[in-house]
Image (tube, grey):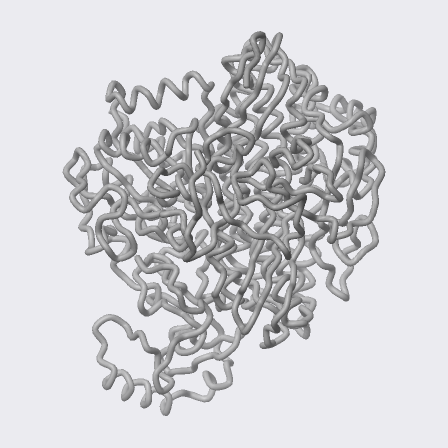
Amino acid sequence: MPLTLLWMQCGACSGDSMSLLNADSPGLLEAFGNLGVEVLWHPSLSAYTPADRRRLFADLQSGSRQLDVLCVEGAVIRGPSGTGMYDTVEQRPKKDLVSALARRARFVVAIGTCASFGGIAAAGDVEATGLQFHKEEKGGFLGRDFLSRSGLPVINLAGCAVHCDVVIGALTALKNGIVPDLDAYQRPVPWYGCTVHQGCTRNEYHEYRVEEKDFGERGCLFFNMGCQGPLTLGSCNRQLWNGRSSKTRVGVPCHGCTTPAFPRPYPFFQTRNIEGIPLDLPDGVKRAHYMVYKGMAAVATPQRLKDRKTGV
Amino acid sequence: MASASSTRIDLPINRGEGDLELRIEMKDGTVEDAWSVGTMYRGMENILVGRHPLDALVITMRVCGMCNVAHLYAAALALDAACAVKVPDNGQRLRNVTLMVEHAQSDIRHAFLLFAPDFVNPVYRSHPLFEEAGRRYQAFQGSTAIETLQETKKAIEIIAILGGQWPHSAFMVPGGVASNPGPGDLLQCLHNLTRFRQWYERRVLGCTIGRWREVRSASDLDAWVEENESQREGEVGFFVRFARAAGLDRIGRGHGNYLSFGSLDMPETTSVVPPRRGTTFVASGFARGTTVEPLDPAQVTEQVAHSWFREYEGGRHPFEGETRPYASGEEGARYSWAKAPRYRGLPTETGPLAERVVERDPLFTDLVRNGPSVFARQLARLTRPATFFPAIETWLGEMAREKESRYYAGQAEVKSGRACGMLQAARGALGHWVEIQDGRISRYQIITPTTWNASPRDSQGVRGPWEESVVGTPVRDPENPVEVAHIVRSHDPCMVCCVHTLQGGRAVGKLVL
């Protein structure tokens, strides 16, 4: 039996769909074929006559056509004043369609940080929110008690954009009847269990506290340039982007885009510091210990790193 | 709205990157009138107010997942100006290469994943090339669709090697770029580019770029298609044959005004020669029909008479613009979340065809002699990568060899005042206008290419570009108006970009129902 999948876009930029198209080994169409996923609808790819499209959505809402996986990309827009009229489909609020389909689906998957937590869309004033979280607070559009027909809450595949391997990995798990462990923010642990810091090629510079204050250098970006890699759960430096690289590897700081708080209200390219040490420390680290460790690390720095001779 | 003898049809259009609906009024099988509706409003510009100026690099990329590098480049240009800093040659080359790769893969993906599936619409069942179109473009299965995904993702690796990831890496900063690719990285990019170019020449053109450049008129084009099997059966040759038989050269006319902001600032020292002499590789300009004039940025205004925003008289230049949504989205005289940009008060289309017309390209000047069409627009898009590949290769080579040139001019202070960044995204003219006060963004306005193309009527009641271009279209099956879909898709809509934003932290204002 093929797994039926419907992909909806709400308050979105399409970045997650674009990321998905970059999938390699397996490629996207290959993955769908191998997995036996029947994509009922994707806004960027599907080709229906208007009548067939209306019939599809009517059948899904009535339940006469089975919906296994509902993927929602983008935040649910409830404004203005709860009417949802900032985001309509055929003059009706799209949020109502999300609600109706979520009730039918066996699994509900939030694609990207906007759908998971509200993300960038929720930073505006259109009353945008995630499917089951509004930032760190559980609830969001569907409410804290929502469970899909399989008994699971919304699965949050966070990221701005989400990594294509994460989406394919999660769908593969669901097709095989494997329910991954979800963390406190309902992100599946296999893809959100390590930090962005793990695998960054600037690790030696980080270890010896060679910290940059400007762009275009080889050193670490954590202390001064706003990098949230050590604080952020994500597989960017493990699975790499586009099969090639990551932001931190090329010298762009991590912005913490998989976290519920993204985008934070602080400048992206500056680190908030106390006495020259970042205000936000890695999970579980005590400040007093960290200061001693970093103090000793700076003393131990070899000249080749001070001179930025070692490549990254 | 509908009179006794005309019918009104509401047409949601997907494969337009976001939410678009077109309301058309039909009479006797022809489109009499049309209203272009942007149905989703996200509030992007005002999210930036109060933030650090460099945050615009990160946030404005999220206006669009498809053209994120274009938004980044526009934001970076505005910040370059605000810092009064000049980008060194290698920084310029890297910026240009990434933007050109974004365009090229976007053009290909649009052509074969967004536009061409309409050739498989049941309306074309008796078209002589219908079955072949199905083999090539069937959604999720067509051979060209599959190859498109395989080849474009390899091209996109170039952006990841040079900038970290695609989409959504803010690797451009005021004064250049944050990255520092070494010769190994650059030579790998050349491999990826060569692979993409060779596929493009083999599958899309069916000939070398050099041979394609010799096509300089409509009659040259006809001869070229029939010259050999490779060109006839290539994607361009197939498109020409299918489109001509389907009458796509006779629909989608519109106002016949064309806008290009110009794009891709030239490095000071380079062996790349832009097609028209100038400081940018892609020329700027405005054309009424085929009469081209220089671009005057002060002529850009946005009107809100038919948009759901608080009213202001006439048009406002983006530096004076404001974005305060007013209505609930219910229909009436106001019907869209998109504003109506105008150039010197005129509606104008923007995109690859506009670039060719403004550049006085002989083939496209010939093709639009009697006005634009679906055919001309789509052909311009299909063949634009050919204009980019040689420059990308040269610039990658120059970066690999030029060890002295830097990628970044060094830290510069962001000054208070106004600045703008105007360039060509894949879909056409893109502009960012920023005002900075006391080290923070105090105003930010964005006009995207689709804002131009999808524009509603202005205060004179003059239709926007694609509204105008669908009027007069004969439609075979009102239940399935694929002709209208062709016209809209020939503009390569990106509706996620199109609509404007809301003042962060302020009350929305009263609903008007």
Q: Residue at x 83, y 35 (%)?
A: B290
Residue A145: quarter of image: top left
The answer to whether one can see residue B190 in this image is no
- Expressed as whole percent of the image width and height from the top left, the position of residue B380 reads 70, 35
Q: Is residue B90 above or below residue B246?
A: below
Q: If the image is split into quadrants, where does the C terminus of chain B sit?
A: top left
- Expressed as whole percent of the image width and height from the top left, the position of residue B502 reads 47, 50
Q: Residue at x 71, y 59 (%)?
A: B265
Determine whether, in the image, residue A119 is placed left or right of residue B225: left
- Expressed as whole percent of the image width and height from the top left, the position of residue A277 reads 35, 82
Residue A270: quarter of image: bottom left
Q: Residue at x 39, y 20 (%)?
A: A54
Looking at the image, which is closer to me, B161 or A101? Answer: A101
Determine whether, in the image, residue A154 is placed left or right of residue B62: left
Looking at the image, which is closer to me, B411 or B35? Answer: B35
- Expressed as whole percent of the image width and height from the top left, the position of residue A247 reads 45, 62
Q: If the image is split into quadrants, where does the N terminus of chain B sit?
A: top right
Determine whether, in the image, residue A29 is placed left or right of residue B94: left
